[in-house]
Image (cartoon, rainbow, N blue to C red):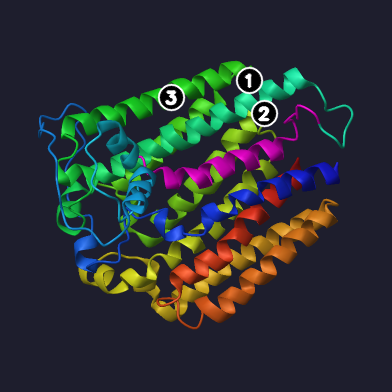
Amino acid sequence: MIAARFLIFVGLLQCLVAFQNPSAVHNGRHSTTSLKMRMRDQNDAFFPFGSGQKPRHDVSLPMAEQSDDQGQLRQLLGVKGASTETDIWKIRLQLTKPVTWIPLVWGVMCGAAASGNYHWMWNPFDEADRNVMLGLEDAAKGFVAMILAGPFLTGYTQTINDWYDREIDAINEPYRPIPSGAISEGEVIFQIWFLLLGGMGIAYGLDVWAGHEFPTVLALSIFGSWISYIYSAPPLKLKQNGWAGNYALGASYISLPWWCGQAVFGELDRPVFFILPILYSIAGLGIAIVNDFKSIEGDRELGLQSLPVAFGVDKAKWICAGSVTLTQLGVAAYLATIGEDTYAAILLALILPQMYFQATLLLPDPIENDVKYQASSQPFLVFGILATALALG
C-alpha cells in the first residue's frame, strides 16, 4: 500500500512547475507597480443586474516587450504581461485566471487521497484494486470535482475580485479586460452569476453522484463562495486586514478543496479531517504574508493593517516563518503518534529545505527575496500536504 501511495506521490511531481511562480497566483491585491495605486478602495455595492453596460471595444495599450507567443500564453493564463485580445471567449478565460486553478485542483487531489477510497483502474501494487469500471467512475468524479474547484469557483472568485478592483485597475493595470473595455460590465456580471450558479449545480450533482444524504459538497461550495465575496467586496473586504485576509486565502486554497475532494470519495467523519487542513491553512497564512512585504509602504500610507504594517518587517518575517514551520512540525508529530512513521519522516524531510530557504532567503531580506523564497520553498510545502493526505488515506 505504501508503494502504491508513493507511486501516486511521484507521479504528481509533474505538477511541481505549477507552483514555481507563486506571485502570479494572487495578483488581485499585489502588484509591482505603484503601491498606492495598487490599493483596491472603491466602495461599490455588487448589483447583479447593474445598469453599467459599457460597449466592448478594442484597445491597444503599450505593454512590456515580449514575444507574441509569450503574450498570448500570459493572456490565456490570466497573468500580468498579457497581450491584447479581442476574442470574447479568450477574454472571459483571462478573467478567471487559469493559473490560479492549480492549487485548488491540487487540494482536491489531496482530499481524494485522504479519503482512502479512490480506486485505480489498474493498481499494480494491489490486486483488489483493479476494477476498470470503478476506476473510470472515480476518475470521472475526480475530474468533475476539479472542474468545480478550478474553472467554476476559482473562476468566480477571480472574476468578482476583478469586478471590485476595476476602478483602481483602470489606473494601475488599464490593459486588464474590465478597465480596458474589452468586455462590458454586463458581460462580467453575467459571467459572475454563470460561474457561481453553475458551480452550485455541479456541486449538487456531485452530492447526488456520491449518494450524500446531506449535500456536503454544495454546502462547502456555498461557504467558499461567500468567503470569496466578503474577501473582495465591501463592507467587510477581508483582504484589507492582514490576519483575516491571509487566513481566508490559506483556507480557500488548502482546506476547502481538500474537504471537497474528500467528501466526493469518502466522509468527513473524523475530527482529524478538519484539524489537519485547518492547521495547513495556518501555514497558508504564512505563505500569504510573504506577499505583503513589498506592499508595506503603500499599505501603511493607506491604512491597511497587513501584518508587516501591524508588527513591522522584523516581527512579521518571524510570524511568517513560524506559522509555516511550526504547523508542519505539529502535523509530522501527529502522524508519528498514529503510527505513520514513514510519512512523518517524509514530511520532516520536506520541512528541512523549507527551513533552509527561510534562513537564507526569507529572514535575511523578505522584501528582496519574496518571490525567490516562495519559488524555492513552496513546492516542498505542497508535497508535504500530499504526503499527509496519503498518510490519512
In the rendered image, is residue 222 in sight? yes
Q: Tell me where residue 81 appears, x and y as whole percent.
A: 30, 56
Q: What residue did someone put label 1 on?
A: 210
Q: Residues within 10 Å of mark 2 (few under 14, many from 20)?
A: many
50 vs 35, left or right, is left
Q: Is residue 107 magenta?
A: yes
Image position, residue 393 (x, y; %): 76, 40
Q: Secondary structure at mark 3?
A: helix
Q: Residue at x 78, y 58 (%)?
A: 344
Amino acid type of the residue tagged 3 in the rendering: Met
Q: Residue 2, relative to residue 41: is it above or below? A: above
Q: Residue at x 51, y 80 (%)?
A: 363
The secondary structure making up most of the magenta span is helix
Residue designated by label 3: 200
Do tag 2 and tag 1 residues touch (Cβ < 8 Å)?
Answer: yes
Q: Amino acid at mark 1?
A: Ala
Q: Nearer the viewer, residue 255 or 145?
A: 145
* Magenta region: 96-122
Tag 1: Cα neighbours inside 10 Å, few (<14), some, or many (≥20)? some
The earlier-in-sequence mark between 2 and 3 is 3
Look at the numbered disc 1 and give the secondary structure of its residue.
helix
Quarter of the figure with the N terminus: top right
The residue most toward the bottom is: 364
Q: Is residue 302 left or right of residue 7?
A: left
For residue 265, the mark is 2
Q: Position of residue 17 (x, y in %)?
A: 55, 55
Which label number is shown at residue 300?
none
Q: Residue 125 appears in which quarter of the rendering?
A: top right
Q: CA distance from mark 1 to mark 3?
A: 15 Å
